[in-house]
Amino acid sequence: MPFSIRTGRARVAVAVAARAVALITVVGCSDGGGGGGDSATTSAAGPSGGGTQVTIDNFKFQPAALTVAPGAKITVVNEDTTTHTLTATKGATFDTGDLAPGRRATITAPSKAGDFPWDCTIHPFMKGTLTVR
Ligand SMILES: [Cu+2]
């Protein structure tokens, strides 16, 4: 019964497609569980708009120690030739995610005072510290 076999395959394909759409919808609606301060937006690197900035070059953060006000926006620019991240290692949730060469991201400092170490998740020897006060 070739016709009935084709119909069966078509039904399976539709079911798979519906599931994929549902998955995309769930991801799109996710807000990350809240907590704040863990979002980052990336864009092509361009002229700096001013404000606080950390540059990544030659496997180093510059500066590697930074003091900002609570909730300050920090622009992270990757001027290196490989992908890096700037990711809080404890006490905070800021994270640029993977920053390809030539990309930048904006992170938000924690709203509470303290010292918040960060590293690059790809190269853990790359370290820095954000001081909020
Ligand atoms: Cu790195």
Image (cartoon, rainbow, N blue to C red):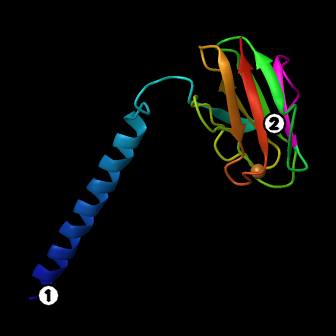
In the picture, residue 27 is in which quadrant?
Answer: top left
Front-most of 93 and 18? 93
Q: Amino acid at mark 2?
A: Val
Q: Is residue 86 visible?
A: no
Q: Earlier in the sequence, mark 2 or mark 1?
A: 1
Residue 48 within the segment the image draws in magenta = yes
Is the CB of the residue bearing disc 1 within 8 angstroms of ligand 1? Answer: no
Q: Residue at x 58, y 28 (%)?
A: 92
Apparent side of residue 37 relative to residue 57 in the rendered image (left or right): left
Q: For residue 92, say whether it is visible.
A: yes
- Tell me if residue 64 comes above or below residue 23 in the rendering: above
Query: Does residue 2 appear to the left or right of 97 in the view shown?
Result: left
Q: Which residue is mark 1?
A: 2
- Residue drawn at x 71%, y 19% is 73
Q: Quadrant of the N terminus?
A: bottom left
Q: Secondary structure at mark 2?
A: strand
Q: Are marks 2 and 1 in contact (CB under 8 Å)?
A: no
> Measured from the top left, where is residue 11 in percent x and y?
18, 67
Residue 38 on image: x %, y %: 56, 30
Residue stretch in magenta = 46-56
Amino acid type assigned to the residue bearing label 1 in the image: Pro
Task: Label 1: state its secondary structure.
Answer: helix
In the rendered image, residue 14, in percent from the top left (x then y), is placed at: 24, 62
Distance, label 2 to label 1, CA atoms, is 59 Å
Can you tell which quarter of the image residue 51 is in? top right
Residue depicted at x 81% and y 24%: 66
